[in-house]
Image (tube, rainbow, N blue to C red):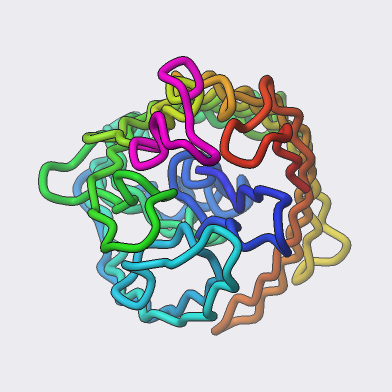
Amino acid sequence: MDSDNVHNHNNNRWKQRPSLYLLGLFYSPLALSNVLDESMEPGVSGYVQFLPATNEFTSLEAVSDNNEKIDSLNQDAKSETEAIPAFLWSLDYTLDNRQTQLYIGTPEENITEGTALFELGILHQLTDGTLLKAAYLPKIPGIASKVWKDPYKTGSNREKTDSDVEGVLLSADYLFDSPLSLQYGFAKQQIKDERSGQSLLNQPTNGLTNNELSLLRRSAEFQQTKLTLTLPLEPSFVVIPSILYTVADAEGDAFSYDRLGADLLLLYTTNNYEFNISFSFATADYDRSHPVFNKVREDE
């Protein structure tokens, strides 16, 4: 998944926490290019890593104990910080041809763009230098992101529900031994118990109708195409720009959009360490006006 979604209403109080559903489908092709090189010997290999991380967010829509009850949709959101411990691991099997590898785990290359999602996949390197990848990102029972059943409920505690995600990834990196990589991802997000706007249904003031309520359904399918260039400026420093086009087809039209974005990854390596920093920008056009805020959502 994708990154922050913003209701441009009252100083972005509805800015969401970074989401996994699309951002985790894509990765640094430079990191992936080393996978087969590091494991060319046929047989089994793998690794385990522990990753400590923190996440800071400010949003009325974010799920946390301090944010369970809100008194108004216009109130200021509190800044919160949470720890996000994660284990990165991979179990790989390289075939005797030394060009094909099967893997399972949470590949470390995803961390370059900030997420760790479970994958089942296959890599195959062609003789012309092209590196092909096909991966499935399954739903894992018992592990799901949390969202509010009705994020617009005020005056009493909001209830949590699961947001399950699964997806597939297809990519061709270093096409014909060039710096060009092309990736396509499909992801499906399912809100288990969707009640967005139920607390506002048929209210005498700022109430919603059943038709308006249907515009707020967040379950969606996402498709993203990404074109990437890997440009080594010197042996230890690489610049990786990308352009992305994303289409979200949500059950509620207020959450459906077309998004155009650009990424820039700067990567510096030494004998013992790797440093990277990434920048992203995107702008999205939404299909319908948001019935709670009476305006079309604008994201940048």
Say above or below: 267 vs 215. Answer: below
Say above or below: 58 vs 298. Answer: below
Front-most of 269 and 78? Answer: 78
Tell me which residue sits at (60%, 76%) in the image. 274
Front-most of 140 and 177? Answer: 140
Front-most of 43 and 65? Answer: 65
Tell me which residue sits at (49%, 55%) in the image. 109
State left or right for residue 290 relative to residue 240.
Answer: left
State left or right for residue 263 relative to residue 218.
Answer: right
Residue found farthest to the top? 211
Provide residue 203's location: percent of width, then percent of height: 42, 36
Q: Is residue 193 magenta?
A: no
**Quadrant of the rendered image containing residue 98:** top left
| Magenta span: chief secondary structure | loop
Provide residue 19's location: percent of width, then percent of height: 48, 51
Residue found farthest to the right? 233
Magenta-drawn segment? 196-212
